[in-house]
Amino acid sequence: MADFDDIYFVRQVKDGNTNAFVHIVRRYQRMVLTIVGKIVINKSDAEDITQEVFIKVFQSLDKFREESEFGTWLYRIAYNTTISQLRKRKHDFVAFEDHSENIKDEDITESIDEISHEERMQCLDTVLSRLSPEDALMITMFYLNNHSIQDISQITGHSIANVKVKLHRTRKIMNFEINKLIQQ
């Protein structure tokens, strides 16, 4: 079977073939769940929000104008849905103080290099869970899902310059916090 692109399936659904939506879900389900799961700690909640995202995508498919990448449009819906759900649930997170200007890059990397990959991943998950939902989502999209700065800008509604600054500051804060965890 030929590998059709997103637009093919979008057009199929718009033309009344609702079964074609299954292909869209299969293609994006894991990535959406990963993004939502990095922000919403509870797996069941993350799965519920992911399902809600796909319901909204299906209901809004007629509004997709094919002016941007379908994936970017879908992630924008995932972003907005997740942030809205967190606001409704009054999700608490531990905000880190922004001391990023005082953190030197060379002070950060040495400790991280001395621990195993598994320990690094545990530290990363711990620190990600303490970030604001928006910061966690940006880090996840950029570093784990390989989205471009421009994609993240479109998804979040922030300017490209603002996305770059947020990613830089968040990365420095995360490195600092990971180092604190390592030294405990």
Image (spheres, rainbow, N blue to C red):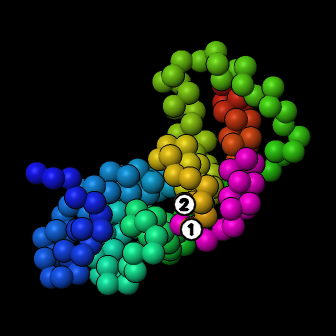
Residue depicted at x 57% and y 36%: 124
Q: Decide: few, some or many residues near mark 2? Use Cα within 10 Å; few <14, some 14-19, many ≥20.
A: many
Residue 151 drawn at (x, y percent): 54, 60
Residue 82 drawn at (x, y percent): 47, 67
Residue on which disc 1 sits = 154
Kindly indicate whether the residue at mark 1 contacts the one at mark 2 (C-beta within 8 angstroms): yes
Is residue 92 or residue 175 the one in the foreground?
Answer: 175
Counting the numbered discs, the total is 2
Residue depicted at x 87% and y 45%: 101
- The amino acid type of the residue labelled 1 equals Gln
Q: Is residue 143 above or below residue 29?
A: above
- The amino acid type of the residue labelled 2 equals Asp
Give the residues drawn in magenta, as a range: 155-169
What is the secondary structure assignment of the residue under circle 2? helix
Q: Is residue 34 above or below residue 64?
A: above
Q: Quadrant of residue 150?
A: bottom right
Residue ranking furthest to the front = 2
Residue ranking furthest to the right = 102
Residue 22 drawn at (x, y percent): 18, 64
Q: Quadrant of residue 20?
A: bottom left
Asked whether residue 82 appears in the rendered view, the answer is: no
Q: Does the magenta portion include 98?
A: no
User: Is 184 situated left or right of 51 in this image?
Assistant: right
Residue 42 drawn at (x, y percent): 41, 53
The disc at residue 17 is: none
Residue depicted at x 32% and y 79%: 61
The disc at residue 151 is: 2
